[in-house]
Amino acid sequence: MSTDLKLYETIKDSGIDLILSLPCIMLKGLLELIEEKNEIQHISITREEEGVGIAAGAYLGGKTPAILIQNSGLGNSVNAIKSLLQLFKIPVIFIMSHRGAEGEKIKAQIPMGQLIPDLLDLLKIRKFIIDSKENIKNIKSAVELSKSLDISTGILLKKTLWGIQ
């Protein structure tokens, strides 16, 4: 099974029923599967904090939303995370490609890539690092934790997951 298909199946099996996304080259295959299979509702967004607002409303309407973005987009969402999600105990799952980490060739990605694990800690968002196909199963744990404690969780998809160095 391909990495993208395993990610897709695990996301679907974890109970996520709404995905909000922005384009990302690392997430391209996964996004194509989401569109092709049409089993999980998908909304393309224009900015990350827009996704936070839509996800909050969807959660209040009974959905289990996830936001599928590059990790750099978390920085664009800090105020919405603190003043909406955390203030009102609205759990949202952030699934992020981890750009700017080891082996990054685009210099502009590096500052946020290095900061993201600490930023998740500072925001009190529990992080799950997925760096291999074997660890994809931890997505279910992240979703279960989010639901049981009404907290947001952050899932970092490392380049090594796709065999990229």
Image (cartoon, rainbow, N blue to C red):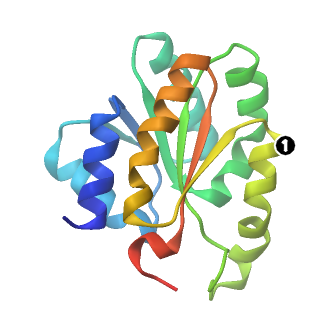
Residue 29 sits in quarter: bottom left
Q: Residue at x 52, y 86 (%)?
A: 165
Q: Residue at x 61, y 18 (%)?
A: 149
Q: Using residue 85 as the reference point, say whether residue 40 is left or right of it.
A: left
Q: Please tell me whether residue 49 is drawn above or below residue 119 in the rendered image.
A: above
Residue furthest out toward the right: 122
Q: Residue at x 77, y 69 (%)?
A: 114
Q: Please tell me whether residue 8 is drawn above or below residue 67 in the rendered image.
A: below
Please identify the quadrant where the N terminus is shown: bottom left
Q: Please tell me whether residue 34 is drawn above or below residue 103 in the rendered image.
A: above
User: Residue 98 location, x and y as percent?
Assistant: 59, 65
Residue furthest out toward the left: 37
User: Residue 18 location, x and y as percent?
Assistant: 36, 32
User: Residue 43 location, x and y as percent?
Assistant: 37, 39
Q: Amino acid at mark 1?
A: Leu
In the foreground, 67 or 164: 164
Q: Residue at x 79, y 38 (%)?
A: 123
Residue 41 sits in quarter: top left
Q: Secondary structure at mark 1?
A: helix
Pointer 1 local density, CA inside 10 Å: few below 14, some 14–19, many at least 20: few
Residue 152 sits in quarter: top right
Q: Using residue 159 as the reference point, say whether residue 48 is left or right of it.
A: right
User: Residue 110 location, x and y as percent?
Assistant: 73, 76
How many marks can you see? Answer: 1
| Residue to which mark 1 is pinned | 122
